[in-house]
């Protein structure tokens, strides 16, 4: 299978910046797309940003102009650079990979999540 490990979440002040990382590991797998989702208290999980293997990117309207998703295909790693953070960005951020393995075929894999708290 594919294991996803996020890192970088922490407490940050409004207006601050943070960079999240997610590294995928496993054997005999390929990744089509990777993305970041978030889930705030009392809300459904939502897509924050996604990126294809060809570096096509999508962003939620709420983060456009502030967040940047990038990907290192050689390292199977995706990043989320978050600038001008707002309290509304507070959530657990989850890494997602649309991946194929010999065992599972093509399906989504999820990381354990990392907490981002924006507060003064």
Image: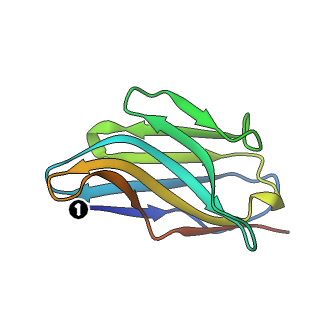
Mark 1 residue crowding within 10 angstroms, few (<14) / some (14–19) / many (20+): some
SS type, badge 1: loop
- Residue 36 location in percent, x, y? 54, 51
Quarter assignment of residue 22: bottom left
Residue at image location 48% in from the left, 63% down from the top: 7
Q: Dividing the image into 4 quarters, which one contains the C terminus?
A: bottom right
Decide: is 5 above or below 36: below
Where is 63 relative to 111, above or below?
Answer: above
Q: Where, quadrant-wise, is the N terminus in this rendering?
A: bottom left
Count of picture labels? 1
6 displayed left or right of 43? left
Q: Which of 43 and 18 is in front in this view?
A: 43
The scheme the figure's colours follow is rainbow
Q: Which residue is drawn at 43% across and 65% down?
A: 111
Q: Looking at the picture, tell me which residue is in the foreground, 45 or 74.
A: 45
> Left or right: 22 with respect to 105?
right
Residue that appears at 39% across and 51% down: 97
Residue holding disc 1: 1
Residue 71 in the image, given as x and y percentages of width and height: 42, 38
> Which of 3 and 12 lies nearest the eye of the viewer?
3
Q: Examine the rendered structure and indicate whether residue 57 appears above or below residue 37.
A: above
């Amino acid at each position: 299978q594919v294991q996803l490990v996020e890192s970088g979440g922490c407490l940050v002040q409004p207006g601050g910046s943070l960079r999240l990382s997610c590294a995928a590991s496993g054997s005999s797998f390929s990744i089509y797309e990777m993305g970041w989702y978030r889930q705030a208290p009392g809300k459904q999980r939502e897509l924050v940003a996604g990126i294809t293997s060809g570096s096509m990117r999508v962003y939620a309207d709420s983060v456009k102009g502030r967040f940047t998703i990038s990907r290192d295909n050689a390292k199977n790693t995706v990043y989320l650079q978050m600038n001008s953070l707002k309290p509304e960005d507070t959530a657990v951020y989850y890494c997602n990979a649309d991946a194929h393995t010999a065992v599972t075929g093509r399906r989504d894999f999820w990381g354990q999540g990392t907490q981002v708290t924006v507060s003064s």
